[in-house]
Image (tube, rainbow, N blue to C red):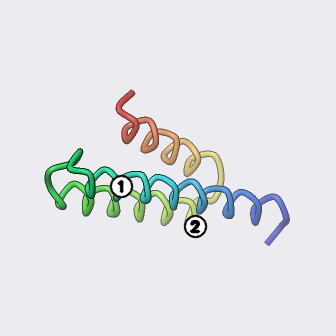
Amino acid sequence: MSTEKGAALFFRGCVSIAWIGRFLAGVWSGRYDTPALFLVLVFLGWISFSLFLFFGGSFAAFVSLFLLLLLSGV
């Protein structure tokens, strides 16, 4: 694995952990009513990570960006 791919994977992992933590904080505070939404987000994250491993590159980055925008409500 090249240094660039390793750094990209590390960065995406940190971003994913941050978004999951933000979502869990929202569930804890009552911002999100249903745990089913959490399961949907985990499933979407798993798909995005799988695409990254399979295609590895710009397509997975596009999907990850789309999911982050979707989660942020933009």
Question: In whole angstroms, how far apart are the C-alphas of marks 2 and 1?
Answer: 28 Å
Whichever of callouts 2 and 1 sits on the residue coming sooner in the sequence is 1
**Mark 2 residue type:** Leu
Image height of 68 relative to 22, above or below: above
Pinpoint residue 16: horizontal percent, then vertical percent.
51, 57
Give the position of the C terminus as an image quadrant: top left
Pinpoint residue 41: horizontal percent, then vertical percent.
32, 56
Pinpoint residue 40: horizontal percent, then vertical percent.
26, 57
From the viewer's perspective, is 32 left or right of 45? left
Front residue (pair 59, 49): 49
Mark 2 or 1, closer to the camera: 1
Q: Secondary structure at mark 1?
A: helix
Give me the residue at 51% from left, 48% from top: 64
Of the numbered discs in the image, which one, if any, rests on residue 25?
A: 1
Q: Residues within 10 Å of mark 1 (few under 14, many from 20)?
A: few
Pinpoint residue 54: horizontal percent, then vertical percent.
55, 66
Front residue (pair 38, 44): 38
Give me the residue at 42% from left, 58% from top: 20
From the viewer's perspective, is 52 left or right of 34? right
Give me the residue at 32% from left, 63% from top: 43
Of the numbered discs in the image, which one, if any, rests on residue 37?
A: none
**Mark 1 residue type:** Ala
Circles 2, 1 touching at the beta carbon (< 8 Å): no
Q: Secondary structure at mark 2?
A: helix
On the image, which quarter does residue 25 sit in?
bottom left
Of the numbered discs in the image, which one, if any, rests on residue 53?
A: 2
Residue furthest bottom as drawn: 1
